[in-house]
Image (cartoon, rainbow, N blue to C red):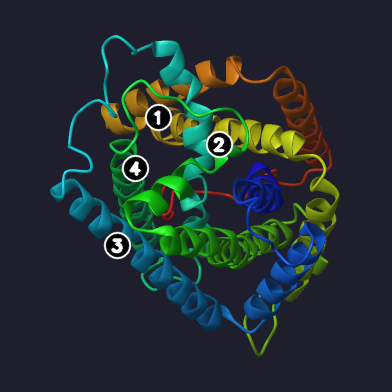
Amino acid sequence: MQRIGTFILGRPRRLSRDRHANANYTLIWDEPVWIIVFVMLAALINLRGINLTANANKIFLAIQLIVFAVFVVGALIAVARGKASFSLDPIFQPAQFSWAIVFGAIPIAALSFIGFDAISTLNEEAKGGGRTVSKATMIVLLAITVIFVLQVYLAAIFVPTGSTFAEGDATNNAFYDIAGQVIGPWFKIVVTLTSALIAIFANSIASQATSSRLVFSMARDGQLPRIFAKVSARRQVPTNAMMLIAGVSLVIGIAGTAEQELLTTLVTFGALTAYILLHVAVIAHFGVKLRSKRVFVQWMSPIVGIIVLGYALWNANDNAKMIGVLWLVIGAGIAAYWNIKGRRPGPALSAGGDRHAV
């Protein structure tokens, strides 16, 4: 449920962020209209089947990679012309270094990387099953890490050492302004449109596709009403689950346009707690239940992850803690109710199951 909530809540937050980050450009429609358009079009594409969903995302990914490649090439050309120089300052400055700042950036990193784990929801439809999904997840994680670091580094070398951006539009517009300075004003418009339209639409399609399949799986396992386990015989998609996710997205998206800080709070807590619980699950299943001998992978690695994420969560916004704890209490209450009624709180996973998917 943490994953579903994070997917849904993240969409209006990003739309508003990109709108305010590009306040000099007119979006033609107000935020609620854009939310309706994005959600409804994404739902229509997903209802047509997984092939159309995959093809649409391939097209949007190609567009974003082309824009990214143009920025990289443009930045390298600018460096060659003496407009900037390569240095380690954007990565590490001894006089400026602080562990508090590093840990303070963990929630930002969580929000930037969240979504790669959604691949696991397509486990049943992927060719090769869990093994393919596990490889795809690691490849995607490594790829977005390289892209993210390269993009931020190349942008940072064009910012004079020691300079900062003012709060508000100056900070939100930082990358767009740098892209315009490095390549030209036209490219700032291209990056703006790519971020505010293409990226958000692609995110809407992917998040609806994956979160609806998670709802379907929970309904099939008896954790949600069986009506959401219905699959279209023609399209082979969970239609009712998709309609539910689209409806919830519309309601939260429109209502959340005026509550961006609250959405950011919920998404941050949801991301951190979801990853912490994932680490706990790895230890509980592989380390304790199966008595795994892979000490680094299934003991040390998740323990370190829990410590790092736990520290970031401990220093999170007070509202995030209160709302997040309330969310967890509700989830624990539902799980307890299932146990009392003799229902499984989750799908069974045997020792001989699909370990690659896990």
Residue at far bottom of view = 234
Q: Residue at x 73, y 39 (%)?
A: 263
Label 1 – label 2 distance at C-alpha: 48 Å
Dot 1 or dot 2: first in sequence order is: 2
Q: Which residue is mark 4?
A: 155
**Which percent across, then down, holds residue 74?**
26, 57
Amino acid residing under circle 1: Gly
- The numbered mark, 4 or 1, whose residue comes first in the sequence reads 4
Which is more foreground, mark 4 or mark 2? 2
Q: Are marks 3 and 1 in contact (CB under 8 Å)?
A: no
Q: Is residue 242 above or below residue 279?
A: below
Question: Tag on residue 69?
Answer: 3
| Pick the front one: 169 or 55 | 169
SS label for mark 1: helix
The span from disc 3 to disc 2 (Cα, nearest Å) is 25 Å
Q: Which residue is mark 1?
A: 287
* Relative to 65, 319 lies left or right: right
How many marks the image carries: the answer is 4
> Badge 1: few (under 14), some or many (20 or more) residues near its Cα, within 10 Å?
some
